Every structure is written in structure tokens, then in C-alpha cells.
């Protein structure tokens, strides 16, 4: 598996191995693609009891970002991306934060950083961002702002079955952030 350069990514986009809608050439760096924060968000709320992943309940409140959202210290939200992506069975991706937001204490993924080969194959899908602030101050998040970056990797061998076609896949064809489906 090897990290793809900007030229590799452009070749893969032309070949249909990577689809990014909308694709902004100006967002492509030497080895990553900047992606933007969408308008849909799930804001975690205090439910006053211990959450059991095997018996999930919705402890999120859906919100639309109209302009900006104030992320409070220690707050956790699920956001979505403007960009919808589709990967072939030969390409996977990794999502990471951007350094300018990292320097503000904003994390964009807690543990789910891998976008599996074949993700979005049925239909280009938005990515869910696990956004958390360790900043002791409130921070504005603006709809449409560059919030994360994707690095793409070419697999040594094509996956036998892409993410969207596996019976165990839980987040297929998503257009907005979805609450956890740990029980499935």
C-alpha cells in the first residue's frame, strides 16, 4: 500500500477510481485533499445516564448550520462533509484534521479515520466527522470551511469485496451524519 501523490489522485479521478463531488482542484495538495464542513450536524446531549453501545439510544439532536456553529469546550458533535466520495476496491483513504484547526484544539475524528476501499461505490457518500474541542474557549465552526483532509492509498491488491457490498457495513449511502450503530 502506498500513499498517493497529487498526480496519482488526479489519475485515479480521471480513471473513476476516486470520485469526489464536488471536486475542487485547488483543494488538492502534494498528497492530500482538503474537504469542507457541511450544514448537517448531530449535537450530543446529556442524557443523565450511562450509554450502552449494545443498546443505543439517540443522545444526539439534529441541527442545521446556518452560517456558523459555536463549538464549546469539551463538546462533541458529529458533522458531515460537503464533499461526497466514492472509492474503488483498489483505493482506501485516511481522514485527518488540518493543522490550523489542530492548533485551535479541534479534532475531527476520534477513532474512525479509515475510509475503506469500496466506500461510496453504490452512491457517493458524505463522511461523518467526529468533532471534539479540547480548547478551553469556544470556537466557531463555519459551514463550508475547510475542516479536514483526505490522504488516499493504493492497495497492493484489489479488495475482494468493497465496503458498500459487505453485509456488515452500517454506513452506506449516507448524506448526513448518522448516530452510532454499534449493535449491528
Image (cartoon, rainbow, N blue to C red):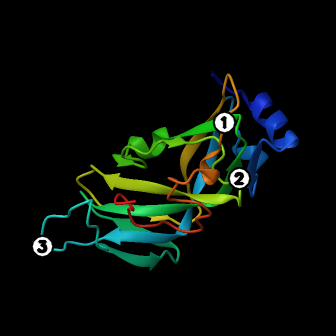
**Observer-nearest of 73 and 4:** 4
Q: Earlier in the sequence, mark 2 or mark 1?
A: 2
- Counting from the top left corner in percent of width and height, residue 117 is at 63, 40
The answer to whether residue 154 is above or below residue 136 is above
Q: Is 166 displayed left or right of 10 in the figure?
A: left
Classify mark 1: helix, strand or loop: loop
Q: Earlier in the sequence, mark 3 or mark 2?
A: 3
C-alpha span from label 2 to label 1: 14 Å
Q: Quadrant of residue 141?
A: bottom left
> Nearer the observer, disc 3 or disc 2?
2
- Counting from the top left corner in percent of width and height, residue 10 is at 81, 37
Residue behind mark 2: 121
Classify mark 3: helix, strand or loop: loop
> Nearer the observer, disc 3 or disc 1?
1
Crowd around label 3: few <14 · some 14–19 · many ≥20 (10 Å): few
Q: Which disc number belongs to residue 160?
A: 1
Residue behind mark 3: 48
- Counting from the top left corner in percent of width and height, residue 115 is at 56, 44
Amino acid at each position: 500500500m502506498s500513499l498517493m501523490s497529487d498526480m496519482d489522485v488526479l489519475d485515479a479521478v480521471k480513471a473513476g477510481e476516486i470520485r469526489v463531488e464536488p471536486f475542487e482542484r485547488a483543494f488538492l495538495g502534494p498528497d492530500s485533499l482538503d474537504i469542507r464542513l457541511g450544514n448537517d450536524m448531530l449535537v450530543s446531549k446529556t442524557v443523565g445516564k450511562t450509554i450502552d453501545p449494545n443498546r443505543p439510544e439517540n443522545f444526539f439532536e439534529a441541527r442545521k448550520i446556518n452560517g456558523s456553529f459555536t463549538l464549546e469546550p469539551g463538546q462533541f458533535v458529529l458533522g458531515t462533509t460537503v464533499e461526497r466520495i466514492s472509492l474503488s476496491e483498489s483505493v482506501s483513504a485516511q481522514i485527518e484534521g488540518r493543522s490550523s484547526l489542530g492548533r485551535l484544539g479541534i479534532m475531527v475524528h476520534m477513532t474512525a479515520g479509515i475510509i475503506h476501499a469500496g466506500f461510496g461505490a453504490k452512491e457517493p457518500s458524505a463522511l461523518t466527522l467526529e468533532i471534539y474541542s479540547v480548547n478551553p474557549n469556544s470556537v466557531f465552526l463555519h459551514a463550508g470551511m475547510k475542516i479536514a483532509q483526505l490522504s488516499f492509498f493504493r492497495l497492493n491488491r484489489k479488495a475482494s469485496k468493497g465496503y458498500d457490498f459487505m453485509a456488515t457495513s452500517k454506513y452506506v449511502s449516507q448524506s448526513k451524519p448518522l448516530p452510532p450503530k454499534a449493535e449491528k
